[in-house]
Amino acid sequence: MSAATSVDPVDIARAAVEHAYDQGWTDGLPVVPVTAATRDEFLAATPRDPGEVVAHAGSLGRECTVERVAVNAAMAGCRPEYLPVVLAAWDALMAQRVVTGGGWQSTSGPAPLIVVNGDVRAELGINSAGGSVGPGFRANATIARAIGLTVRNVLGIRPHELDQATQGLPGRFAVCVGENEELSPWEPLSMELGAAPGAGSVSAMLIRTCEFVDNRDSTDPEDLLRDIADTVARTGTVVGGRSSAGLLLGVEHATLLADGGFGKADVAAWISEHAVRTAADLRAAGKGRAAGDAPDDAPFPMVPEPEHLPIVVTGARNAGMSLVVRPFGFGGWSRTTHPVHVGGAAA
């Protein structure tokens, strides 16, 4: 073919991307064109059967197979070796009652929080250190994006259609973090939930939002806990007299707490006990219906059970900062971790 009649492959790629937009397959960002060969390359990265159902929306009568997850992972920009983590994330999400109960269609527009533990973090380049909740890392961004594309393209839950989000969250694009096991003073979340040391493992839940706690001055662990509890007890997150919380602790904060004698269970118990508002607080915030006829000084625990607070250490050791996340629903999360299966065995 002469140079005058040749077709620039970049133009072909652009046309494929525009076709994806025209078909409604994107989340607003360009997607990677996928061929049958690409799909097969992804499927070769997992021992799971392509026809295995890994996700479903019962109220809609829709389900998703390994093959369809693979296609959407490729579209999201994943490398084939990321697919086992994406599948483990779906296993973890489907263990959540709020997911199987229609949480994807909530007016709060929840986003998946995916936590990866074990040696697979380094093997795939999953960021556990500085900027772990932010952009710039292909594995973190595309693994989470693969979940969102699957929700859109396979389960059919799209904005202005079945997705009822009032405003939604930018996190629907990407909230995938590695736990900073190397600098954490405590055992990682996966081991807390029964996984072996170093085993590739994924936990996940739907969250409403993230709120930062910037405390670089506290030297007393209880001062820090009071600051965190104040954020946890914020009235803006209260629905029906209840709220929810989880902690993505920075290394400095986790170290201060551990050096002060607090284990993760102790932190969760302290926050649960002290993150309390009164009926008067709720009435003053326009949420008197939740307070009912309770006297003004009646306490309303925002997180009534300590196990409602997942705790993960992530990020760099460079400032006293942490994030409070808001798990969707008030019945607690599944407290499960799910193995990453590669080539017929757990990673």
Image: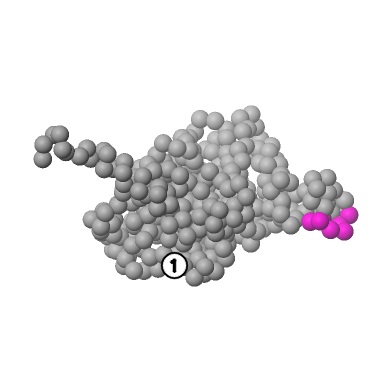
Tell me if residue 294 is in the magenta stretch.
yes
Q: Answer few, some or many: residues within 10 Å of disc 1's Cα (few below 14, many 20 plus, some between 14 and 19).
A: some
Q: Which image quadrant is residue 13 in?
A: top left
The answer to whether residue 193 is above or below residue 296 is below
Tell me if residue 138 is in the magenta stretch.
no
Q: Residue at x 86, y 57 (%)?
A: 294
- Drawn side of residue 264 relative to residue 141, left or right: right
**Residue ID for mark 1:** 63
The percent coordinates of residue 211 (x first, y second) are 61, 41
Q: Is residue 146 visible?
A: no
Q: Nearer the viewer, residue 335 or 148?
A: 148
The percent coordinates of residue 184 (x first, y second) are 49, 42
Instruction: Give the residue furthest to the left.
Output: 1
Q: Which residues are magenta?
A: 289-295
Image quarter hosting the C terminus: bottom left
Q: Amino acid at mark 1?
A: Glu
Q: Nearer the viewer, residue 110 or 269?
A: 110
Q: Tag 1, which secondary structure?
A: strand
Q: Residue at x 83, y 45 (%)?
A: 284
- Drawn side of residue 219 relative to residue 298, left or right: left
The percent coordinates of residue 202 (x first, y second) are 44, 55
